[in-house]
Amino acid sequence: MSQYQPSDSNHGSFNEVSFFDRRLPIILRPNRGPNLVNVLVFIGVMGFILYQLLLMPRSFFAFDMVSTRPVTAWFSSLLPVLIYLAVIGTCIFTVWRELVYFRPRGSYYLQLSKSGLVVSTPITLKRFEWESVERFRVEQKREQGKGGSRMVYIVQANLRDGGTFNSALKLRQLDFAKDLGHDKENSAEILCAFLNEVRDRVREAERFRDDVVASVPYGLVVDEASDMAEQPAGRPAKPKAKAAKTVERKPTIIRD
């Protein structure tokens, strides 16, 4: 992965972006739904491989301990099956991620508040204080896709732990900023600039104890998260126990 160097043309396009104001805390959700084309393609590939595996004779998987056939030769013949299983696993994960991560109002989001940044996925929930988050930057890497390799842009920030940066927070541009700008590079830069602005405004507001208002670029999907600045999103706060009311009983007088 290499750090992306923004071009002058992309910097100039920031003037064409419109914004709207939202008071923190807010929830930033993916601005796309499941890619149904990818889902159908991977389901088709998975079905084709399963069909090919069913056509293989059972003797192909049998291992005769008495046979003089070397173990390495048996493993080499089994290698295509292992590759098939690895491809099936990749297809299952891709289909599951598309359908679960990007369903409407799902559990994949970012919560931005004065107290910190919450990153929620269907399987994890992580919270970071702004003091431990370095400035965001855009990274680029090449990934293999359906039509060959493609360039993927990631908005990334190093995380401080004990005075050293030993981990990173990574957000895919295709998840939260798809078609936000005029191209993928510009979309990643807009998302990066927005997160850095929120980070800087929170640090500035800490000195004056002011509310933080974020300028959100149009195209980002934002929900309000009122009264959740101190409570991680997606985890409802426990209801406070109500004090028991004391009922004064009057003595019952029985008269003859």
Image: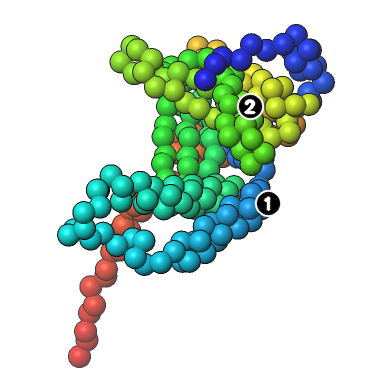
Q: Which mark is residue 48?
A: none
Residue for badge 2 = 151
Q: Nearer the viewer, residue 182 or 41?
A: 41
Q: How crowded is mark 2: few (under 14 residues within 10 Å), some or many (20 or more)?
A: few
Residue for badge 1 = 37
Residue 63 visible somewhere in the drawing = yes
Q: Which of 191 and 178 is in front in this view?
A: 178
Report the side of 72 relative to 150 (left or right): left
Position above or below: 135 against 249 = above
Residue farthest to the right, as pictured = 16
| Secondary-structure class at tag 1 | helix
**Residue occupying the point 43% across, 49% down:** 80
Residue 139 position, x and y percent, is 57, 19
Residue 252 position, x and y percent, is 24, 77
**Residue occupying the point 37% across, 50% down:** 77
Report the side of 76 relative to 9 (left or right): left
| Secondary-structure class at tag 2 | strand
What's the CA distance linking mark 1 and mark 2?
Answer: 20 Å
Position above or below: 186 against 236 = above
**Residue occupying the point 28% across, 44% down:** 72
**Residue occupying the point 30% across, 51% down:** 74
Q: Name the amino acid, label 2.
A: Met
Residue 48 in which image quadrant:
bottom right
Q: Name the amino acid, label 1.
A: Val
Residue farthest to the top, as pictured = 8
Q: How crowded is mark 1: few (under 14 residues within 10 Å), some or many (20 or more)?
A: few
Residue 251 in which image quadrant:
bottom left
